[in-house]
Image: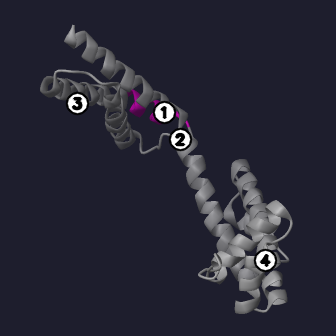
Amino acid sequence: MKNFYSNYNEEDLLVAYLYMVDHTGKINDEMYEVICKKFNYDEFVQKAEYRKILIKEKGRISFDVHNSVQKGDKIDLILKNISSEVIESDDLKIFIVEEFEKFVKVKENDKIDKDVIYKSLLGIVVGTMAGFLFLKTVIAFTHSFSFFLLGPVYIINYFVIYGFTRKTRDNLIVFLAVFISVIISTILTFIQII
């Protein structure tokens, strides 16, 4: 019988090793055999433990960057305040900048202001009409209504509202606008059918 782990590369073995150790406390004989055959076991374990420490450290740094972005700190202040004994300074700077950019985009997307509200209201009107026309067209050809049609209506209305607001559905106002426009599109379609 062929060993399950024999086709794993180093990356896959590291992931499998860490998963197994985290969940069972030890590895099975098949994995041990493959690790010993392909690598020096002690060096492999060291590499896996370093990877585990690195993941935790990146999680800590990401958390710190997120909190700093929420407070409104600028990138220069964040770079100055966050340090690491595990990650090299150049790699640390790159990681912090990437996390900063990611969290700034999320914060900007989640921001609710008058502009988003007005554009969402306009999106509701246009999205409702687009969804209504889609439903009316499909029902005219099929002569029946299916609740499965609400999926495409949701997608159409979402893209219309996204086009106006440039915010994703993670923004509460955009989510509500899409939801309301789908409901109104459906109600208008039923009123038209009756």
Q: Nearer the viewer, residue 115 or 37?
A: 37
* Front position among marks 3 and 4: 4
Q: Residue at 69%, 54% (x, y): give it.
A: 69
* Front position among marks 4 and 1: 4
For the magenta stretch, what is the residue range?
112-121
Q: Which residue is mark 4?
A: 29
Q: Position of residue 141 (x, y in %)?
A: 13, 27
Rate crowding at label 3 as few (under 14), some (14 to 19) or many (20 or more) other CA atoms within 10 Å.
some
Q: Which residue is mark 3?
A: 134
Tag 1 near tag 3, CB within 8 Å: no
Q: Which residue is mark 1?
A: 175
Determine whether, in the image, residue 25 is placed left or right of residue 170: right
Of callouts 2 and 1, the N-terminal one: 2
**Can residue 109 be spotted in the picture?**
yes
Determine whether, in the image, residue 86 is placed left or right of residue 170: right
Rate crowding at label 4 as few (under 14), some (14 to 19) or many (20 or more) other CA atoms within 10 Å.
few
Of callouts 2 and 4, the N-terminal one: 4
Dot 3 amino acid type: Phe
Which residue, as the protein is rendered here, is positioned at the far front?
1
Gap between marks 2 and 1 measured at Cα: 7 Å
Q: Is residue 155 above or below residue 71?
A: above
Q: Nearer the viewer, residue 51 or 6?
A: 6
Dot 1 amino acid type: Phe
Of callouts 3 and 4, the N-terminal one: 4
Determine whether, in the image, residue 140 is placed left or right of residue 12: left
Classified by dominant secondary structure, the portion drawn in magenta counts as helix
